[in-house]
Image (cartoon, rainbow, N blue to C red):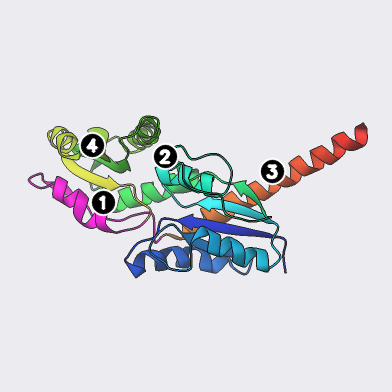
Amino acid sequence: MTDAAVLVIAHGSPDPHWMERVEEAVRPYRRQMLIRVAYLDGVEGRDIADEVERLERAGVETIAAVPLFVTAGSTHVSEIRGMLGLEPDAITPNVKPVATRARFLWCQPLEDHPLVEQIVCERLRALSVDPHREALLLVGHGSDLPGYRERWERLLHRLTFRLQNRFYFSAAGYATLRPDTVATRARQLASCGELVVLPLFVSQGYFTRRALPERLAGVSYRYDGSAYLPHPLIGEWIVQSAKTAFLLDYQTQRSVIGDGQAT
């Protein structure tokens, strides 16, 4: 029995292979700590409330919540925070917090964490032949909603800037599916060199296999449809995120105790 655990929260998919990639990412770390995975969609009996209840029955009092999403620009991240009772969810105001006595420690989504950037660089090296003669296009899901759209833009801008400084492509840019800027941006960049397209998605699925290739029709490009999963560094990112949350919580609790003794 342990009083602390990790809850990885992923979107889910009708494709069972999508979920299996998530489970594979955390499997090697289950001997180190108690880790459960919850899904917003696609897996009956595995939603956030179900998994929190299982952890509570196991005696868990503190849960590090790790959202396995590309960015806080996803409305699902706000939805999850609302379900955990961390803040009201303005996007889906009818969402009710799960009933639990456990405390939640919030971890940030993937964003441009150093381990994420390492994964992206590995994927680029596998695709790129001669960066000086190539143009890079990063593609994210994006959002049409104010605030969320800007978060996506900031992430894509940061990654594009850093990758360009590392690889020195003839040109580099980014696009989103929402709003749909893929075709226009792809044609612009293709005029600067052989187009290399890199999608920023948690796992392969509809968007990487169908939605994005459909938008690139008529453009010559290099693309393998790879995503963050499966990659062992995703599991490492999950564990690092949780350990950091537990450490910060411990330091905060020690500080509170220290302040109380001082008075």
Disc with the residue nearer the chain's start (4 vs 1): 1
Q: Amino acid at mark 3?
A: Leu
Residue beneath label 4, please?
132
How far apart are the alpha carbons under marks 4 and 2? Answer: 43 Å
Q: Write the start and end of the magenta stretch as one range.
A: 203-230
| Amino acid identity at mark 1 | Leu
Query: Which label's residue is closer to the chain start, 3 or 4?
Result: 4
- Badge 4 marks a residue whose secondary structure is helix
Q: Residues within 10 Å of mark 4 (few under 14, many from 20)?
A: some
- The residue that mark 3 highlights is 248
Which label lies toward us, 3 or 1?
A: 3
Task: First in sequence, mark 1 or 2: give its number.
Answer: 2
- Answer whether residue 225 is magenta in the image: yes
- Report the Cα–Cα distance between label 3 and label 1: 39 Å
Q: Are marks 1 and 2 in contact (CB under 8 Å)?
A: no
Residue at (28, 42) in percent of width and height: 139
Earlier residue among tags 2 and 3:
2
Which element is circle 3 on? helix
Q: Which residue is mark 1?
A: 127
The percent position of residue 111, horizontal first and vertical second, equals 45, 42
How many residues crowd mark 2 within 10 Å: few (<14), some (14–19), many (20+)? few
Assign the C terminus to one quadrant of the image: top right
Task: Please give the name of the residue rendered at 25% of the width and 57% of the height, measured from the top-left corner.
Answer: 206
Among numbered discs 3 and 1, the one appearing first in the sequence: 1
Distance from the alpha carbon under mark 3 to that under mark 4:
43 Å
- Residue type at mark 4: give it: His
Residue 247 vs residue 216: left or right? Answer: right
**Residue 227's spot in the image, x, y percent?**
34, 54
Rendered view: 183 above or below 10: above
Number of numbered discs:
4
